[in-house]
Image (cartoon, helix red, strand yellow):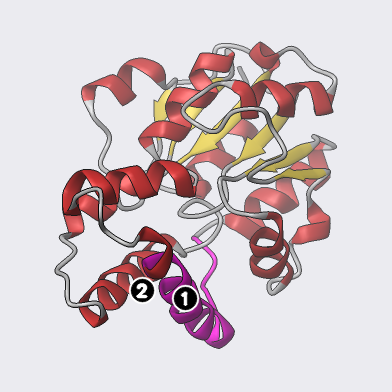
C-alpha cells in the first residue's frame, strides 16, 4: 500500500524508533524500583511510554499511590540509564539507510521527542546522527506534550509545510495519537508496544522496521 500522497518531509520520534533506548529505560526503572523496595510491573512501565515525565509520574502514582516518591525513582533510574548509555545504546534497524535515502531525495527531516534536549543531543550525538536532522524538538520546546498534537504542529511549522504533506514515524500509542491528531500521515513502527485497533485506524501503515518505511518512500505512488 502506497502513501496517500507524496511525503515532502519526514518527522521521527527518537526513543524506540531511532534508538533501542526504551528497553534500557524499562530495565532501569524496574531495577531502581526494586532498590527502593517496590515491584514495578512491566505493564505499568509500558503505560509510561510516549509520555513526558509528568505523565509518567502520574502513571506511577496511580499504581503505587499518591505518596510514592516519583522524584527519587526518576533521579536514580536516570543515573542507572546513563551508566548503561555510556556503554552504548544501539540504533534501531534501518536508521542509517533511511537517512541516506532522505539525503539522496533531498527531503527535510526532524525529530520530535518526549526526552529532554540534553538526552537527545547525547544519544543522537553518540552515533553521529544529531546533525543529520534539520531540527530536534525536545521536551519543553512545544506547548503541550504528546498525545496532544502540539509537538507535530510545531514540527510542521519548522518545516514550513502543512502537516498533511509530512510523514510522521512513531513507535508509541501516544506518539501516533499526536502525529495523526496534527494531520500528518503516520506510520507506527512498533517497539515495546503492540499496535491496537486504534493504531491501525490512525496510521496509514504499521511497518515492521525502518527498512520497510524506506522501501515505501522509494516506491512510486
SS label for mark 2:
helix
| Circle 1 residues within 10 Å: few <14, some 14–19, many ≥20 | some
Relative side of 46 to 82, left or right: left
Q: Residue at x 72, y 29 (%)?
A: 155
Kindly tell me whether residue 47 is visible in this rendering. Answer: no
Q: Position of residue 216 (x, y in %)?
A: 54, 32
Kindly tell me whether residue 179 is visible in this rendering. Answer: yes
Q: Which mark is residue 28?
A: 2
Considering the whole magenta stretch, tell me its main secondary structure.
helix
| Residue 81 covered by magenta stretch | yes
The foreground one among 126 and 35 is: 35
* Magenta residues, start to end: 73-92
Q: Position of residue 174 (x, y in %)?
A: 41, 32
- The quadrant of the rendering that contains the N terminus is top left
- On screen, residue 2 above or below 31: above
Q: Position of residue 151 (x, y in %)?
A: 63, 29
| Circle 2 residues within 10 Å: few <14, some 14–19, many ≥20 | many
| Residue 119 covered by magenta stretch | no
Q: Residue at x 83, y 43 (%)?
A: 134
Q: Position of residue 123 (x, y in %)?
A: 64, 67
Residue at mark 1: 81
- On screen, residue 218 above or below 124: above
- On screen, residue 49 above or below 5: below
Relative side of 157 to 5, left or right: right
Q: Residue at x 72, y 46 (%)?
A: 101
SS label for mark 1:
helix
Answer whether labels 1 and 2 touch (C-beta < 8 Å). Answer: yes
Measured in 3D between alpha carbons, the distance from the residue under mark 1 to the one under mark 2, in whole angstroms, is 6 Å
Relative side of 71 to 19, left or right: left
**Which residue is at the far front?**
67
Amino acid at each position: 500500500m502506497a502513501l496517500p500522497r507524496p511525503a515532502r518531509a519526514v518527522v521521527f520520534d527518537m526513543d524506540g524508533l531511532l534508538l533501542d533506548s526504551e528497553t534500557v529505560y524499562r530495565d532501569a526503572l524496574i531495577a531502581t524500583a526494586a532498590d527502593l523496595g517496590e515491584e514495578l510491573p512491566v505493564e505499568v512501565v509500558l503505560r509510561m511510554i510516549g509520555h513526558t515525565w509528568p505523565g509518567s509520574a502520574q502513571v506511577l502514582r496511580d499504581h503505587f499511590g499518591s505518596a510514592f516518591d516519583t522524584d527519587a525513582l526518576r533521579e536514580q533510574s536516570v543515573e542507572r540509564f546513563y551508566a548503561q548509555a555510556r556503554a552504548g545504546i544501539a540504533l534501531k534497524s534501518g536508521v542509517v539507510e533511511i537517512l541516506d535515502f532522505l539525503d539522496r531525495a533531498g527531503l527535510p527531516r526532524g525529530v520530535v521527542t518526549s526526552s529532554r534536549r540534553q538526552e537527545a543531543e547525547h544519544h543522537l550525538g553518540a552515533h553521529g546522527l544529531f546533525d543529520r536532522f534539520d531540527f530536534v524538538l525536545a521536551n519543553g520546546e512545544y506547548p503541550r506534550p504528546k498525545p496532544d498534537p502540539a509537538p507535530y504542529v510545531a514540527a510542521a511549522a519548522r518545516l514550513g509545510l502543512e502537516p498533511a504533506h509530512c510523514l510522521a514515524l512513531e513507535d508509541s500509542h501516544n506518539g501516533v495519537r499526536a502525529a495523526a491528531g496534527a494531520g500528518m500521515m503516520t506510520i507506527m513502527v512498533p517497539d515495546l508496544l503492540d499496535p491496537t485497533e486504534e493504531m491501525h485506524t490512525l496510521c496509514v501503515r504499521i511497518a515492521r522496521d525502518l527498512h520497510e518505511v524506506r522501501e515505501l518512500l522509494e516506491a512510486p505512488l
